[in-house]
Image (spheres, rainbow, N blue to C red):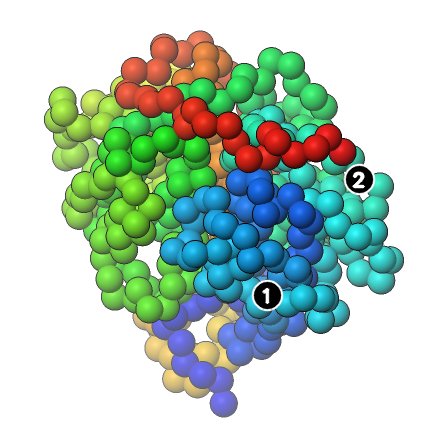
Amino acid sequence: MTELIGHEQLHRTAKYFMDNGRAATHEDAIGILRGFGLSIHVGPEVAVSAQHQIALLTLVNLARRTFLGGIEAVSVPDAPLLVPLATASSLSEAVRMLGATAVPRRCGAWPVAQIGTCDEPDDKLPEWRLTFGGWRGGVVPARGGQRLAEKAGNPLGAALAAAACAAELFSWYAKDHPMAGKRAAGMSLWKPGTDWKAEDPTEPRLAYLPSRLWLIGLGNLGQAFAWLLACLPYADRGKVELLLQDFDRMAASNDSTSVLSSLDLVGQKKTRAVAAWLERVGFTTELEERRFGAWTVRSPDEPGAALCGVDNPMARAALDKPGFDLVVEAGLGAGPDGFRNFSMHTFPASRRADQIWSGQKSRTIDVSAMPAYAALRKSGLDDCGLAQLASRTVGVPFVGLIAGVLTVAELLRRLHGADGLELVAGSVASLGDIEACYAPSQPYASGFVPVASEKLPEESLVER
């Protein structure tokens, strides 16, 4: 008999296979995800390089939410943890805390992700290499793929590489893109839409980081923002003020999409759960637990730069209203055909937020005729429950992470003198086809601090 399930318990990635008709029930969809697994192999760089650790821990965090067959991390050393992405005393402990099994050698017959200098790949299953350099990051086939410098640079490139790897692996398992496992996929954060594998002498060395931010929405995107801010090399996170705004509570379904969510947090206010994580990292937080809208007013002593990650046209239409100096807004696509899509807007811009979103309705795609929903109806789920389930869109954590990388990187771009991006749009199914619209922008005026001044450990690595 089909198990009844509510929208708050729905695994949002399993919904992909419910919505496209491949799964006859929710249990079938979960069973498909339980056939997905990943073996992560690491090289010696991970013991001394913060960026390699960011790539590893971000990939584990993303993968355990999607590939339910298991994640194994091979030969992870018992080295000091160089990035505050887990409350662990060592890297191997952090890997376990985030959901992988640390093993001395490969056990599962799963595709492989390589981080750092690893053994030559075999030809039985796809193997990807995560690679990053400067403001760029992505994934290439482990055999013959072009490797970037993988030295000190913008750490968001390492997080981007992890998300690109998860996206390619999902497409390979789902069999919905013929090139998955055979191609390179990545992006330049300094110049989105250009060749990410090409060295770019205009990329600046990271020198400044934002110090006062207002985060609107703490779901998939908002939690990605928080994770990525923790990846940045702040000298003193206690000097960074983050105002967190959300009205909602954690649900079981958030565990499948949002990088700071877990089942033990179900029922907690999102503001308080995310604030607790950020405070453990060292940031200073303030909370606003009302809905964001046209009634929201920023006082002069509150952060002037905002990162927005809400899926609500009415709230997005009000982004010009509070009086922010800068808003960077991220959005995700919907439905079985569009869930890989993402966009980023900034304001002030040539069009006001209300001109873009006023009159828009929340996205709904009717999938109620698919077999999985018919099975739920037959098992006793009423029309209201079916409508709630059908209205929830497919969600995967790696798309939100990539949109989050672009969003946080836009603050860094402007802090380092680049012209602003007014709009970026693309899909993780084709990261080489990003559309970017540039516009002159005012100097960043919302508070900044210098990066940590000490020499980064990876700079001492011997040249390969």
Relative depth, front residue between 245 and 211:
211
Which residue lies most toward the right here? 123
Amino acid at dot 1: Ala
Image coordinates of residue 329 in percent, x first then y, are 38, 33
Relative depth, front residue between 397 and 24:
397
| Residue 45 vertical position relative to residue 61 in the rendered view, above or below | above
Q: What residue sits right under mark 1 in the picture?
A: 102
Tell me if mark 2 has few (under 14), some (14-19) or many (20+) residues whose alpha carbon lies within 10 angstroms of its own: some
Q: What residue sits right under mark 2 in the picture?
A: 145
Residue 71 lies in what quarter of the image?
Answer: bottom right
Name the residue: 14% across, 30% down: 297
| Residue 238 vertical position relative to residue 449 in the rendered view, above or below | below
The label on residue 216 is none
- Asked which secondary structure carries label 1, the reply is strand
Tell me how far mark 2 sits from mark 1, CA to CA: 26 Å
Name the residue: 17% across, 28% down: 302
Q: Nearer the viewer, mark 2 or mark 1?
A: 1
- Give left or right: position of 364 versus 426: left
Image coordinates of residue 179 in percent, x first then y, are 77, 47
- Asked which secondary structure carries label 2, the reply is loop
- Give left or right: position of 358 versus 196: left
Q: Can residue 315 be seen in this view?
A: no
Name the residue: 58% across, 21% down: 191
Tell me if mark 1 has few (under 14), some (14-19) or many (20+) residues whose alpha carbon lies within 10 angstroms of its own: many
Lower sequence index among marks 2 and 1: 1
Relative depth, front residue between 402 and 114:
114
Pointer 2 and pointer 1: residues touching (CB < 8 Å)? no
Image coordinates of residue 47 in percent, x first then y, are 59, 47
The C terminus lies in quadrant: top right
Amino acid at dot 2: Gly
